[in-house]
Image: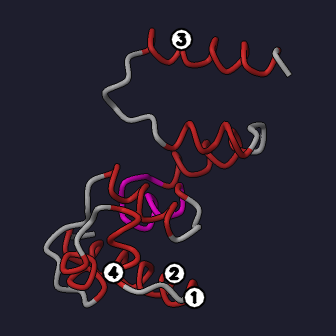
Amino acid sequence: MADNDQAKKFGVWIKSARSSQGMTLGQLELQTGYSKGNISRLEKGLASSVPKKDTIIKLAEALKQNVDEALAIAGRLGSDEIKDLNDTAKTLSPAQLRVAAHINDDVTPAQLEDITRYIEFRKSQG
């Protein structure tokens, strides 16, 4: 799908989620740091591309929506990745899912291991 088509699809999703939350563009801007002008262009199908992954995550969280769904709608995940993620997500707690959603491509495997060890440590502390 062309990037502009994906942006339009994501914009419709954002507007629907924002409307269902009763949230204004200004409120969404305050919660995400993504300008209301950019949000408006996205919602109206005028954006030339979807936002960056970290912005999509912020938008989804501010709108109390599933981050993986947002990434998929924005075209940042393929269908095989979605199935794998759904299978994995079933084994994680809500807190672990929130942490995982913030991990980006800049995190090295060694850093992921450190994060996992820290999570296990915190869990052992009660």
Find disc 4 in the rendering and name its residue.
26
For marks 4 and 3, the one nearer the N-term is 4
Cβ–Cβ under 8 Å for marks 2 and 1: yes
Q: Residues under labels 2 and 4: Cα distance? A: 15 Å
Helix or strand or loop: what does disc 4 sit on?
helix
- Callout 1, which amino acid? Ser
Upstream in the sequence, badge 4 or badge 1?
1
Q: Is residue 1 above or below residue 78?
A: below
Which residue bears the numbered disc 3? 114
What residue lies at 26% left-to-right and 62% top-to-bottom? 51
Q: Position of residue 53 (x, y in %)?
A: 33, 51
> Rounded to the nearest whole Å, what is the CA distance between mark 4 and mark 1?
15 Å
What is the distance, in whole Å, between disc 3 and disc 1 at their CAs? 38 Å
For this view, does 39 lie left or right of residue 9?
Answer: left
| Nearer-N-terminus badge (2/4) | 2
Residue under label 2: 17
Cβ–Cβ under 8 Å for marks 4 and 1: no
Q: Is residue 73 magenta?
A: yes
**Label 1 crowd bin: few (<14), some (14–19), many (20+), radius 10 Å:** few
- Image x and y of residue 122, in percent: 73, 19
Residue at disc 1, secondary structure:
helix
Classed neighbour count for the residue bearing mark 2: other residues with Cα under 10 Å, few (<14), some (14–19), many (≥20): some
Boundaries of the magenta span:
68-78
Give the class, few, some or many, for how many residues have Cα within 10 Å of label 3's Cα (few <14, many ≥20).
few
Which residue is under mark 1? 20
Dots 2 and 4: beta carbons under 8 Å? no
Q: Is residue 126 left or right of residue 64?
A: right
Residue 40 in percent (x, y) is at 25, 85
Vertical arrangement, residue 61 with respect to residue 7, above or below: above
